[in-house]
Image: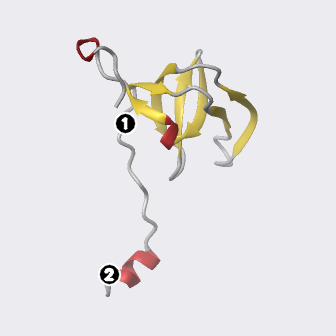
Amino acid sequence: MLHSQFLRKKRIVKMSKFNKGDLVYISSDTTIFKWSDNESVPVGPTKMLKGPKRALFVNDVSDYYSRVIFDGEPWTLKETDIFELKGEEDGGKIS
């Protein structure tokens, strides 16, 4: 089977660079929202972060969205809005 035929038949899922429990950085002006576990679709409410926040990474919910724990609740956001938070020895800088 040709490589292009294989790609058409098999769904490619992007792997997250984060692991469950990682402390992550979320930039300001990021929209976060709730995600339906049983239907795998976004549901309300949404919230716009007014400032940068730290959260715990939970898992990927789709190819483009990930779930984090923020303010004691699970929230979903675009994976591109999540950044690695380095340790104190690095001054807590993001990468």
> Badge 2 is on which residue?
3
Report x, y in % for residue 53: 52, 19
Q: Residue at x 34, y 31 (%)?
A: 95
Q: Earlier along the polypeptide chain: callout 1 or callout 2?
A: 2
Q: Residue furthest bottom?
A: 1
Q: Is residue 42 above or below residue 73?
A: below
Q: Amino acid at mark 2?
A: His
Where's the N terminus, which quadrant?
bottom left
45 displayed left or right of 75: right
Q: Which residue is at 38% across, 50% downward?
A: 15
Q: Which percent across, then down, holds residue 25? A: 45, 25
Q: What residue type is disc 1 on?
A: Phe
- Give the answer, above or below, for where 16 lies relative to 14: above
Q: Image quadrant of residue 17?
A: top left
Residue depicted at 68% across the width and 48% down the height: 41
| Image quarter of residue 83 | top left
Compared to residue 80, the image places residue 85 above or below, namely: above
Which residue in the protein does label 1 denote?
Answer: 18
Q: Residue at x 64, y 24 (%)?
A: 49
Q: How is the image coloured?
A: secondary structure
Q: Quarter of the image holding residue 74?
A: top right
Dot 1, how many residues are within 10 Å of its Cα: few (below 14), some (14-19), or many (20+)?
some
